[in-house]
Image (spheres, helix red, strand yellow):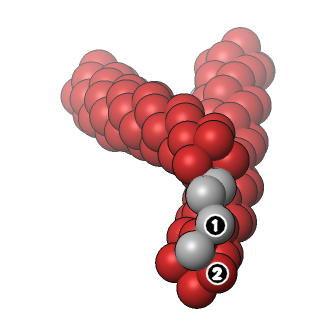
Amino acid sequence: MANWNDIKLNVSRAANKTIKKAGELADSASMNIKLKTLNAKLGDRFEVLGKLTYKQLKFDTSHAEEISKVIAEIDELREQIKQLKEKIAEAKEERQKSAEDVKIDEENEETEE
């Protein structure tokens, strides 16, 4: 039968792993929600760009200044999306590395017993 200290240690390790994993999942979910929000904003800006372009071509009026502003907003959103995707990829790699480290630790613990 395992002694009390071993049981406490195992429970403590499990709790710490659970807390860490929950935090990682919350961060991941938050970044993915932000990505969806940015993509929705990007779609809205493309819609505005399309409407302005249509008006400019249909009614032969210049909306160049407004179009330039919308294009700048689109470029900014695309850059934010790119950076966020990179951050999500880095977090995913870190989670995978962490999972591999945990697996190695567990295998080492099993061989020690």
Toward the bottom, the furthest residue is 58
| Side (left or right) of 111 relative to 4 | left
Q: Which residue is mark 2?
A: 59
Q: Amino acid at mark 1?
A: Thr
**Which element is circle 1 on?**
loop
Q: Position of residue 30 (x, y in %)?
A: 73, 44
Number of residues whose C-alpha sits closer than 10 Å to that of mark 2, classed few (under 14), some (14–19) or many (20 or more): few
Q: Is the C terminus in the top left, top right, bottom left or bottom right quadrant?
A: top left
Relative vertical location of residue 9 with respect to residue 54 in this rendering, above or below: above
Identity of the residue drawn at 68% across and 47% down: 66
Q: Position of residue 15 (x, y in %)?
A: 74, 31
Task: Report if residue 100 is visible in the image.
Answer: yes
Toward the top, the furthest residue is 5
Q: Position of residue 108 (x, y in %)?
A: 27, 24
Identity of the residue drawn at 64% across and 55% down: 63
Q: Amino acid at mark 2?
A: Phe
Quarter occupied by residue 86: top left
Identity of the residue drawn at 58% across and 85% down: 58
Q: Nearer the viewer, residue 30 or 58?
A: 58
Relative vertical location of residue 20 with respect to residue 74 in this rendering, above or below: above
Query: Mark 1–mark 2 contact, CB under 8 Å?
Result: yes
Q: Position of residue 81 (x, y in %)?
A: 50, 42
Q: Is the N terminus in the top left, top right, bottom left or bottom right quadrant?
A: top right
Task: Report if residue 11 is visible in the image.
Answer: no
Q: Which mark is residue 92?
A: none
| Side (left or right) of 101 relative to 37 | left
Q: Nearer the viewer, residue 25 or 67?
A: 67
**Which element is circle 2 on?**
helix
The residues tagged by marks 1 and 2 sit, at their Cα atoms, a distance apart of 5 Å
Q: Nearer the viewer, residue 4 or 45?
A: 45
Q: Which residue is mark 1?
A: 61
